[in-house]
Amino acid sequence: MKKLIAGAILLGASSMVFAQPGCGVGSMIWKGQSGVVPHVLGATTNGIASQTVSMTLGLAGCNTNENVQSMAMLIDARGSAVAADISRGEGENLNAMAAALGVTPVDKKAFFELLQNNFSVIFPHQDTATGEAVDAIVALLEQNDALSKYVAA
Amino acid sequence: MGFTLRIGQAVLWLACSTAWAQAESVKLPDNLHHNPTWLTLGHYHQDRFGSDYTSQADDPAFFLSDNGKTSPRAELEATLKAIQQPGGGDSHARCRFPARDAWLREQLDLPDTPVNCSAFEEWAGTLNTEKVTLVFAASYLNSPSSMFGHTFLRLDPPQDDEETDLLLANTISYAADAAEHDSELLFAYRGIFGGYPGITSIKPYYEMIRLYNDIEHRDLWEYTLNLDQQEVDTLLAHTWEIQDKNFDYYFFDKNCAYRLLALIDAARPGTDLLDEVSTHAIPSDTVRWVRDAGLLESIHYRPSAATSVAHSLDSLPSDQQTIAAAVANGYVTVNDQEVRELTKDDRAQLLDATYDYVRYQSEAEGWPREHAAPLSHQLLVARSQIDDAEELPDVPEPEIRDDQGHDTFRLSLGSGQQAHSEFTQLTIRPAYHDVLDPPAGYRTGAQLQFLRLDARLYHDTDELQVEQITGVEIRSLSPRNQFFAPISWQVGFGGRRTDTGNDRVLTPYLEGGAGGSWSLGQNTQAFAIATADVEIDDDIKRGYDVAPGADLGLLHQNNRFSLLTGVKTKAWIISSQQRQDQFYAEANWHIGREFSLFAKFTREDHYDRYQSTWQAGLHAYF
């Protein structure tokens, strides 16, 4: 009784991890219950393959630095956890951000401190969206002598 | 889109096959096409009747021979011919089937001439994999398709590479491509009967964490496999070979876990994990098979957001827990005195725990954004002003992992007495877990039974009777407290022997219930559930009967024994118009995680008469 059904598609890694998103705002850091994942039908079940990467993500001025885009995708996916790590000055998401930007172990502490001290600049209010936060982070790094090399376009 | 892709590949394949030149003939050992590695790479399985092999791939593009699906020999000969063709490029057989190419060259001592496979090399280079980790997302009772857990593979980059991080690592996950609007029931139906294509997706690990850990509150267990670099490369090469190819998705057997086992088998020939699958591949079982096959190198536990939050709140002193609840609900603000007068470390921990709680409630309980978002922001602004504080303690790794819990197949033998008739009872339960089974490695208060059969042989009449057939039965008892207020619920259907006053008749039934549960100490909870039952049978006066009711009881679970006791009442209102009241007590003594001794007793008042039933016996878990 096996029906022949359409294929298994293995998405090319390069197209997923380093997507070229369009210019836009991205989702809010502190999302509400906006129907992203209704509980009864878990999108992650053995289950349903879901479109989870925000395709409207982008940066004002469309920064084309690939590393910044990777960081942006991470922030878009786990914004509220990333914000928490930034406010604490440590955490797995900060480590991942550092890795995405290629920050060397020597510079990591300064990087984390810079972000923690400027929390309110990166996240000015509760409706901050990914794009704004990323732009603010990039601006902070550009103004910092030691760290600006990581966001050179 | 998938269909067009297949046509395109089929056309390409046909075009290539008509342009073959004569290959040099190489002596093929007689039985090479029956070599287990070849069979694994071709996904060949022995036919049930006869000694032929058929491939599970349903796509002509997977085969180089017209008879490839049913003939490993034809496919081997066609592959050998194709890989010896001169040239290269992405459409050459050597680049479409790099794993087959490497194996044949090794087996037949063919020269390893270099070939230009730019698409494959770029893909493998981007994935940059040194180790492969099997990640198991623990079961999630609230969604039938998630109840048995889920497994996917994570491709770990080299440890010493500073530019990568495990959160950014890529994962391979198979899932059914269900249409967005399919309800759970439709998914269950279509998934079981092969109504969905299987989709493989590659996503960064942080996406999986977001979906499983954060949103679905499922703990993740990361089992790093001890595959060496060559085996890892073979796994990737074979993944490349099966991309874009049809493989049917079947919920019970050819599911997410199954496809991953096939990949691991291809990486290390001789492992034969697929051999363990008979009728079903439960993800937690597949982890056991991988462990028993000696494939594990290291294990890492990643608690879900729910587990972490509960633990964080629990580790605060109780007066601070009250403050946390007050802040979360808006009675106290972040700048109020109660918060400001705490020490730096206490304040940091309070803010962290409260923030995690508010985020959890926002996701899980749908707290309105107008309340949760500004509060989240305030909490973090306050937290960012505290430097170098002591962190909240990590969630300790559970002593018993999910894969170390009792085996899922249970066989029980017991004897007892119903009214005054003695009987011997045999129970067969293919899956999964009962609240009285050894609790280690399973969710507290969670019960999931599938296709359970209880059969009795009565001694006086020598009559064999089915006592109950349970199709599915699910129960979730979760204690409420000041932070979390889950609903405890249950649902089940099947056939059971019911008292009609004159006789005991096997009747189809459907039952459900909802209510609450409260913790009475470490391993004990008291619950109160409002229930509803429906039974349908010709032997019932009006053909069916309905009963609202209640179930009040106590559940205690620990590694040495578990106990469930309480009272149930059902008011049958349509046909019999009788109330059925029952006192029940059931206890299991656990002998490790392989056996339990059980004893149960019920005393029932129905049709104005009292009846006692008791039973005792042994459960064995396989």
Image (spheres, coloured by chain):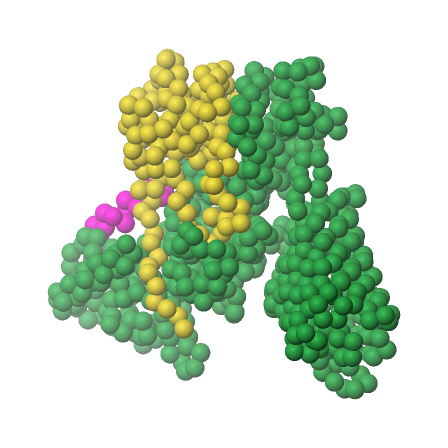
Chain colours: A yellow, B green
Q: Position of residue A59 (x, y in %)?
A: 33, 26
Q: Quadrant of the C terminus of chain A?
A: top left
Q: Is residue B223 above or below residue B549?
A: above
First to last magenta residue range: B113-130
Q: Position of residue B179 (x, y in %)?
A: 40, 54
What residue sits 41% from the left and 23% below the top? A133
> Is there any visible trace of residue B151 in the rendered image?
no
Which of the 4 quarters of the picture holds residue B311?
Answer: top right
Residue A70 versus residue B330: which sits nearer the camera? B330
Q: Is residue B494 above or below residue A42?
A: below
Is residue B170 toward the left or the right of residue B297 in the image? Answer: left
Which of the 4 quarters of the picture holds residue B37?
Answer: bottom left
Which of the 4 quarters of the picture holds residue B405?
Answer: bottom right
Is residue B187 toward the left or the right of residue B488 in the image? Answer: left
Q: Position of residue B243 (x, y in %)?
A: 33, 55
Q: Position of residue B108 (x, y in %)?
A: 29, 66
Residue A88 versus residue A120: which sits nearer the camera? A120
Is residue B550 toward the left or the right of residue A105 in the image? Answer: right
Indicate whether residue B255 is drawn in magenta.
Answer: no
> Is there any visible trace of residue B12 in the rendered image?
yes
What residue sits 81% from the left and 56% below the top? B566
Q: Is residue B189 above or below residue B126?
A: below
